[in-house]
Amino acid sequence: MNLNGSYVSSLFSTTLGVTFHHYLEEFRLARAKDLLRDPVKRVSEVAYAVGYSNPNHFRNVFTTRVGLPPSAWRRNQTPDSLPTPSRTQTPGLAQKEHHDSIVMRAPDKSYSRVPSH
Protein backbone atom coordinates (compact mmCIF):
# COMPACT_ATOMS: atom_id res chain seq x y z
CA MET A 1 0.00 0.00 0.00
CA ASN A 2 1.52 3.31 -1.08
CA LEU A 3 -0.06 6.34 0.62
CA ASN A 4 0.97 9.96 0.42
CA GLY A 5 1.93 11.30 3.87
CA SER A 6 0.24 14.65 3.26
CA TYR A 7 -2.97 12.92 2.21
CA VAL A 8 -3.03 10.69 5.30
CA SER A 9 -2.30 13.68 7.56
CA SER A 10 -5.10 15.68 5.93
CA LEU A 11 -7.51 12.75 6.22
CA PHE A 12 -6.57 12.32 9.90
CA SER A 13 -7.16 16.03 10.63
CA THR A 14 -10.46 16.09 8.76
CA THR A 15 -11.73 12.93 10.45
CA LEU A 16 -10.63 13.62 14.03
CA GLY A 17 -10.50 17.41 14.05
CA VAL A 18 -6.90 17.57 15.28
CA THR A 19 -3.56 17.16 13.56
CA PHE A 20 -1.74 13.88 13.87
CA HIS A 21 1.12 15.65 15.66
CA HIS A 22 -1.26 17.14 18.25
CA TYR A 23 -3.03 13.80 18.73
CA LEU A 24 0.27 11.95 19.19
CA GLU A 25 1.56 14.56 21.63
CA GLU A 26 -1.62 14.37 23.74
CA PHE A 27 -1.51 10.57 23.68
CA ARG A 28 2.14 10.56 24.81
CA LEU A 29 1.50 13.08 27.57
CA ALA A 30 -1.48 11.13 28.90
CA ARG A 31 0.63 7.98 29.03
CA ALA A 32 3.50 9.93 30.61
CA LYS A 33 1.18 11.09 33.40
CA ASP A 34 0.25 7.47 34.09
CA LEU A 35 3.90 6.46 34.21
CA LEU A 36 4.89 9.44 36.35
CA ARG A 37 2.56 8.19 39.07
CA ASP A 38 5.12 5.45 39.67
CA PRO A 39 7.58 7.10 42.08
CA VAL A 40 10.30 4.59 41.15
CA LYS A 41 10.45 5.70 37.49
CA ARG A 42 12.83 8.50 36.58
CA VAL A 43 11.57 11.26 34.30
CA SER A 44 14.07 10.22 31.63
CA GLU A 45 12.70 6.64 31.73
CA VAL A 46 9.19 8.01 31.23
CA ALA A 47 10.39 10.15 28.32
CA TYR A 48 11.89 7.16 26.54
CA ALA A 49 8.89 4.95 27.33
CA VAL A 50 6.45 7.34 25.65
CA GLY A 51 8.56 7.81 22.53
CA TYR A 52 10.79 10.82 23.14
CA SER A 53 14.44 10.24 22.26
CA ASN A 54 15.55 13.32 24.22
CA PRO A 55 14.40 13.65 27.86
CA ASN A 56 15.04 17.42 27.80
CA HIS A 57 12.69 17.82 24.84
CA PHE A 58 10.11 15.75 26.72
CA ARG A 59 10.47 18.02 29.77
CA ASN A 60 10.01 21.11 27.58
CA VAL A 61 6.93 19.72 25.82
CA PHE A 62 5.42 18.50 29.11
CA THR A 63 6.05 21.85 30.81
CA THR A 64 4.58 23.83 27.90
CA ARG A 65 1.46 21.66 27.51
CA VAL A 66 0.78 20.78 31.18
CA GLY A 67 2.05 23.94 32.86
CA LEU A 68 4.47 22.20 35.21
CA PRO A 69 7.67 20.23 34.72
CA PRO A 70 7.15 16.46 35.03
CA SER A 71 8.84 16.25 38.44
CA ALA A 72 6.70 19.09 39.84
CA TRP A 73 3.55 17.56 38.35
CA ARG A 74 4.43 14.27 40.09
CA ARG A 75 4.93 16.02 43.46
CA ASN A 76 1.54 17.77 43.13
CA GLN A 77 -0.39 14.53 42.74
CA THR A 78 -2.60 13.67 45.68
CA PRO A 79 -1.90 10.47 47.59
CA ASP A 80 -5.19 9.06 46.25
CA SER A 81 -3.91 9.36 42.67
CA LEU A 82 -0.68 7.46 43.35
CA PRO A 83 -0.50 3.66 43.13
CA THR A 84 -0.96 1.80 46.38
CA PRO A 85 0.72 -1.50 47.18
CA SER A 86 -1.43 -4.60 46.91
CA ARG A 87 -2.21 -6.40 50.15
CA THR A 88 -0.77 -9.57 48.64
CA GLN A 89 2.38 -7.85 47.41
CA THR A 90 5.63 -9.44 48.47
CA PRO A 91 7.64 -7.13 50.76
CA GLY A 92 10.58 -5.50 48.98
CA LEU A 93 8.96 -5.61 45.56
CA ALA A 94 7.57 -2.55 43.78
CA GLN A 95 4.47 -3.26 41.70
CA LYS A 96 3.51 -1.63 38.41
CA GLU A 97 0.39 -2.42 36.41
CA HIS A 98 0.55 -3.05 32.69
CA HIS A 99 -2.34 -3.73 30.35
CA ASP A 100 -3.18 -7.31 31.30
CA SER A 101 -0.36 -8.29 33.57
CA ILE A 102 1.47 -6.97 36.59
CA VAL A 103 5.19 -6.39 36.44
CA MET A 104 6.99 -7.02 39.69
CA ARG A 105 10.22 -5.12 40.22
CA ALA A 106 12.62 -6.83 42.58
CA PRO A 107 15.11 -4.87 44.70
CA ASP A 108 17.84 -5.78 42.19
CA LYS A 109 15.75 -3.91 39.56
CA SER A 110 15.01 -7.01 37.50
CA TYR A 111 11.48 -7.42 36.15
CA SER A 112 9.21 -10.41 35.92
CA ARG A 113 5.69 -10.62 34.54
CA VAL A 114 2.92 -12.29 36.49
CA PRO A 115 -0.65 -12.60 35.20
CA SER A 116 -3.14 -10.25 36.83
CA HIS A 117 -6.57 -11.36 38.01
Image (cartoon, rainbow, N blue to C red):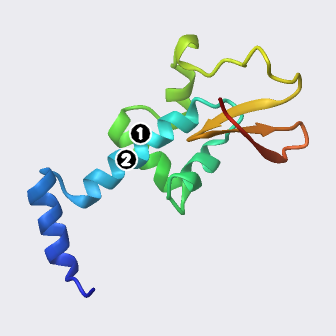
Residue sticking out furthest to the bottom:
2
Q: Secondary structure under badge 1?
A: helix
Front residue of 116 and 74:
116
Q: Residues within 10 Å of mark 1 (few under 14, many from 20)?
A: few
Image coordinates of residue 34 in percent, x first then y, are: 51, 34
- Contact, mark 1 vs mark 2 (Cβ under 8 Å): yes
Q: Residue at x 52, y 19 (%)?
A: 77
Q: Residue at x 37, y 47 (%)?
A: 27
Q: Is residue 69 left or right of residue 85?
A: left
Locate the N terminus by quadrant.
bottom left
67 w.r.t. 10: above or below:
above
Amino acid type, residue under disc 1 in the picture: Ala
Q: Secondary structure under badge 2?
A: helix
C-alpha separation, residue under disc 1 versus residue under disc 2: 5 Å
Amino acid type, residue under disc 2 in the picture: Phe
Determine which of the numbered discs, if any, sits on residue 105 in the image: none
Q: Residue at x 15, y 52 (%)?
A: 16
Q: Which residue is mark 1?
A: 30
Residue 24, quarter of the rendered image: bottom left
